[in-house]
């Protein structure tokens, strides 16, 4: 009888310890549409302000979003923040997963190229993506041109990419990326 009680107690303890710590906080509820929108807007602001770690801190362990669209946006923001924090492989994988759903999304393609441009073996693919977006006049933002300029060899093409970046950027300093 003592062994049965001890075994039951050990099983209960092991089961409790095996559950992820986040379960206790989340109650398996989803955020409301308003809460999801507010959270995503705050994360986008952090990303625009150059604070990718704040995006991760805000979105990584929050409850489920109210809709699949909000969930995809959350995944996108975390992927971009991961790339900018140097966790390139994680971000690239997430962006590729999102691109399976919308393969021609210029913004996602430009962010994928940003990540690939920071990886060891992805520079050629990144350059091909950005050159195609540029040729089709689909470059979504100044950052796409900044990454393109960084990937191109010095010369006319890189100079044109910097000029296009400066036309779209709020500040010319946004068009100078560190290596």
Image (cartoon, grey):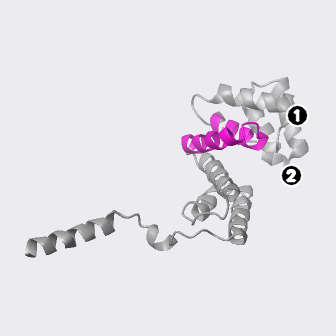
Residue at image position (62%, 62%) is 54
- Asked which quadrant contains residue 34, the reply is bottom right
Quadrant of the frame with the N terminus: bottom left
Residue 178 seen in the current view: no
Q: Nearer the viewer, residue 74 or 154?
A: 74
- The quarter holding residue 106 reads top right
Can I make out residue 101 in this image?
yes
Residue 25: % across, % down: 48, 73
58, above or below 114, in the image: below
- What percent of the width, then of the height, locates residue 13? 26, 70
Estimate how packed mark 1 is, as few (under 14), some (14 to 19) or many (20 or more) residues with alpha carbons within 10 Å: few
Which range is magenta?
88-116
Residue that carries the numbered disc 2 in the rendered image? 170
- Measured along the vertical axis of the image, is residue 119 above or below residue 167? above
Question: Residue at label 1?
Answer: 137
Q: Is residue 81 above or below residue 105?
A: below
Give the farthest residue toward the right. Answer: 167
């Amino acid at each position: 009888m003592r062994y049965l009680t001890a075994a039951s107690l050990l099983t209960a303890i092991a089961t409790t310890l095996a559950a992820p710590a986040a379960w206790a906080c989340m109650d398996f509820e989803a955020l409301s549409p308003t809460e999801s929108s507010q959270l995503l807007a705050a994360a986008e602001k952090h990303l625009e302000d150059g604070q990718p770690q704040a995006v991760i801190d805000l979105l990584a362990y929050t409850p489920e979003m109210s809709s699949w669209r909000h969930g995809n946006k959350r995944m996108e923001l975390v992927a971009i923040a991961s790339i900018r924090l140097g966790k390139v492989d994680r971000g690239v994988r997430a962006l590729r997963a999102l691109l399976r759903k919308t393969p021609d999304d210029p913004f996602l393609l430009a962010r994928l190229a940003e990540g690939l441009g920071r990886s060891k073996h992805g520079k050629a693919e990144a350059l091909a993506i950005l050159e195609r977006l540029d040729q089709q006049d689909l470059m979504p933002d100044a950052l796409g041109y900044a990454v393109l300029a960084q990937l191109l060899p010095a010369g006319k093409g890189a100079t044109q990419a910097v000029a296009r970046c400066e036309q779209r950027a709020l500040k010319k300093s946004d068009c100078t990326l560190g290596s």
